[in-house]
Structures are given as C-alpha cells and as structure tokens.
Image (cartoon, rainbow, N blue to C red):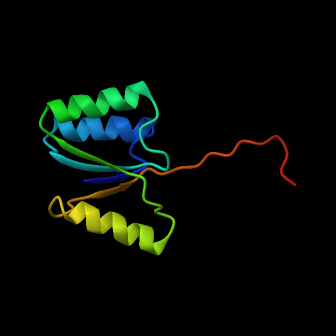
Amino acid sequence: MLLAGGLGGFGLELADWLVLRGARKLVLTSRYGLRTGYQSLRVRTWRGYGTTVVISVADITTRTGVASLLSDANKLGPVDAIFNLAVVIEEILFHE
C-alpha cells in the first residue's frame, strides 16, 4: 500500500486501519518525514505487528519523484493500492 501524505492526521488513521485489517507492507510519503512523537509511536506500533513501514520523502510533485517512489515501493512487492491524502492548506485573511 502506498499512502501519499501518509504521515498526516487522516493518513495515520487510514494506515492504522489498513494494518489492523492485514496490510503488512506500507510506504508512507511525507514532505518532511517523521516529525512528531505520535507519528513515531504509530510507526513503531505497526512494525511491532510485523508490518514493513517505509517512510519516503520523495518529491511526488515531479515525474521523476513519482517514478522513484514507485520503484522503491515495487521493491517490497506489488503495489496493491495507492491513496492520495497529500494536502497543503494555506490559510490567509486576504488574497491579493
């Protein structure tokens, strides 16, 4: 399973749901990698269940970044599903 934006709030919950239902190979993408204790806790927990978890910081906004990500993911075996949860929220009061 490949989860783009997999270390965000919804991504972590979806990954947990997948692992609890038998997913044993996950590739989670994030622009910054592991940054919080909660993210690290979730990854350690899944690995404790026997799940292989790979964290990728590949730039999936470029064609070469996506190709690299898919190549790395395929090394774990066939990619069964791709979930795009990548979101950038930009809050501003006024837009010029």
Estimate the x, y position of residue 58 in percent, counting from the top left.
Answer: 42, 59
The residue at the point 12 percent across, 37 percent down is 50
The residue at the point 39 percent across, 42 percent down is 11
Estimate the x, y position of residue 15 in percent, counting from the top left.
Answer: 29, 40
Position of 27 relative to 79 (above/below)? above
Tell me: 76 left or right of 82.
left
Tell me: 18 left or right of 13.
left
Q: Quadrant of residue 23?
A: top left
The residue at the point 32 percent across, 40 percent down is 14
Estimate the x, y position of residue 19 in percent, counting from the top left.
Answer: 20, 38
* Numbered-mark total: 0
Tell me: 88 left or right of 68.
right
Q: Quadrant of residue 18?
A: top left
Tell me: 3 left or right of 48.
right
Position of 72 relative to 54 (above/below)? below
Nearer to the camera, 72 or 84: 72
Q: Quadrant of the C terminus?
A: bottom right
Estimate the x, y position of residue 29 in percent, counting from the top left.
Answer: 39, 51
Nearer to the camera, 28 or 57: 57
The residue at the point 58 percent across, 49 percent down is 88
Farthest right residue? 96
Nearer to the camera, 51 or 90: 51
